[in-house]
Image (cartoon, helix red, strand yellow):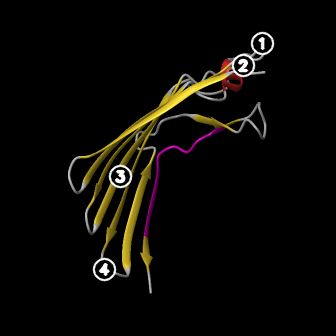
């Protein structure tokens, strides 16, 4: 039987009617199997940080989000990923032009961080490169 220990904490603070701040941390530790790293052979990170700054008024909403993955070791047998720790930052905005038209945009991975994700349950040996900097813009029309 594996023992799992962990906790998660999150704090949100409204600065005023328009600005909100958020921070969170999650820690997890799963006992290792023989000849393997802890946390499902390094698939799960030991820590994850989340930060958010949000601005929202009647017409404009902007969010700046960051996620830090800390100490994700990977397999004991081979290191196939780029880093055991990394940060990814995104920014998104929505602007309400009228009751029927909304513009939106997002820049994902602003700093073009090179990192990988793993889909353990599908293939425990596979790591998949995540997207570099990416942008999306669009318009929503409601009628």
Asked if one can make out residue 24 in the rendered structure from this viewpoint, the answer is: yes
- Which numbered marker is on residue 63? 3
Kindly report which numbered mark, 2 or 1, lies closer to the viewer in this rendering: 1
Q: Decide which of 4, 76 is in the foreground and name it.
A: 4
- Earlier along the polypeptide chain: callout 2 or callout 3? 3
For mark 1, give the secondary structure: loop
User: Badge 2 is on which residue?
Assistant: 78
Q: CA distance from mark 2 to mark 4?
A: 55 Å
For mark 4, give the secondary structure: loop
User: Badge 4 is on which residue?
Assistant: 98
Q: Decide which of 129, 21 is in the foreground and name it.
A: 21
The quarter holding residue 79 reads: top right
Q: Which residues are magenta?
A: 128-138
Report the side of 19 relative to 136 (left or right): left
Q: Residues within 10 Å of mark 3 (few under 14, many from 20)?
A: some
Q: CA distance from mark 3 to mark 1?
A: 43 Å
Residue located at (55% from left, 22% from top):
71
Q: Residues within 10 Å of mark 1 (few under 14, many from 20)?
A: few
């Amino acid at each position: 039987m594996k023992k799992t220990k962990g906790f998660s904490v999150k704090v949100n603070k409204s600065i005023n009617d328009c600005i909100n701040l958020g921070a969170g941390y999650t820690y997890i530790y799963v006992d290792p199997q023989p000849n393997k790293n802890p946390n499902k052979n390094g698939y799960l990170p030991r820590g994850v940080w989340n930060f958010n700054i949000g601005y929202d008024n009647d017409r404009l909403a902007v969010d700046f989000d960051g996620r830090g993955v800390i100490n994700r070791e990977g397999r004991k047998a081979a290191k196939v990923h780029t880093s055991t720790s990394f940060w990814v930052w995104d920014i998104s905005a929505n602007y309400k032009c009228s009751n029927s038209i909304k513009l939106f945009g997002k820049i994902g991975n602003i700093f073009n961080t090179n990192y990988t994700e793993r889909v353990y349950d599908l293939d425990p040996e596979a790591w998949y490169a995540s997207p570099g900097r990416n942008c999306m813009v669009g318009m929503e029309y409601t009628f």
